[in-house]
Image: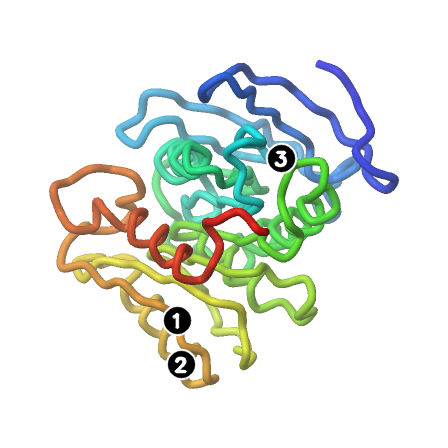
Amino acid sequence: MRRIILGDALAVCVLVVGCLIDSACAQTINLWPGVAPGSENWRQKETVTADTPIGTVVNNVVTPTLTLFLPEKSKATGTGIIVAPGGACIALAIDLEANQVARWLHERGIAAFVLKYRLQEKKGEGIPPDLNMDEACKYGIADGIQAMKVVRQHAADWGVSPDRIGFMGFSAGAMVTSGVLLQADAAARPAFAAPIYGGPFGVMPAIPANLPPIFMAWAQDDELAQQPVVKFYEALRAAGNKPEIHVYSAGGHGFGMRKQRTTSDHWIEEFYWWMQAKGFTGTRK
């Protein structure tokens, strides 16, 4: 492991995690220069469980990171997307809803930044019935806002345009996405956002008008998230925004990159076509 300085303001620790995609090496950086604010007294130990039914799952994150999937310069479009996996803000489905997504985007010249955000300490199995999502996810939202700052700060280093950086999240990661999208500082919002089968799972925040372009996707048989997602969509519409929506007849909750022989298998292609229509997939001239 080696320490390098990226820019004037941030000292981050870079860990080369191996050549994962084509000939490119993914790198992981610490998101904050030091202990992340608000979790100075956290003592839980991060755990990583491989080979679960949804691939690798991470729990008890104290030190948030970004893993960089940067395309070759000859393929780079100048667009970047921060990807936040879900897991009720007590776990992260880091493969199904992040790394696989990042590799798919990377292959098409889009830089991807996998966000491993802070999580509420996991105690016992399953999701606690009294889980307060606003409380559990507030650290992930803070990490998402910081991730936007970091990527924009180093846009030139990482081959992306500061005004072409989007944010995508799944389930609780979509709640993180919504927090970044709806933040009070309009200039700090992403260029576009894609909350996938998720959004604010707690109290509905204030929805500004004139938000950046939004892409939403969920399945009609999603018993966990459909109600809050529809509520979020309606709130966006009521504020004058016009999100693109894709509602699949089947797919359940947490379909991610899983192939189930349903139309939800192709959400990411439809997201890409939407990005294409918005001008985010071609190189800037």
Tell me the distance, in whole angstroms, between the alpha carbons under discs 3 and 1: 29 Å
Tell me the distance, in whole angstroms, between the alpha carbons under discs 3 and 2: 33 Å
The amino acid at mark 3 is: Thr
Considering the numbered disc 1 on the image, is that residue within a helix, a strand or a loop?
A: loop
| Mark found first going from the N terminus, 3 or 2 | 3
Considering the numbered disc 3 on the image, is that residue within a helix, a strand or a loop?
A: strand
Disc 2 crowd, CA 10 A, few/some/many (<14, 14-19, 20+): some
Q: Quick one: 240 or 274, which is closer to the camera?
A: 274
| Mark found first going from the N terminus, 3 or 1 | 3
User: Residue, x 44% and y 55% (percent of image)?
Assistant: 174
The answer to whether 52 appears left or right of 33 in the picture is left
Q: Is residue 198 above or below residue 92?
A: below
The amino acid at mark 2 is: Arg
Q: Quadrant of the N terminus?
A: top right
Q: Position of residue 133 (x, y in %)?
A: 48, 58
User: Residue, x 45% and y 19% (percent of image)?
Assistant: 22
Q: Quick one: 251 or 138, which is closer to the camera?
A: 251
Q: Quick one: 219 or 240, which is closer to the camera?
A: 240
Where is mark 1, residue-wise? 243
Q: Which mark is residue 139?
A: none
The answer to whether 220 appears left or right of 229 in the picture is left
Where is mark 3, residue-wise? 65
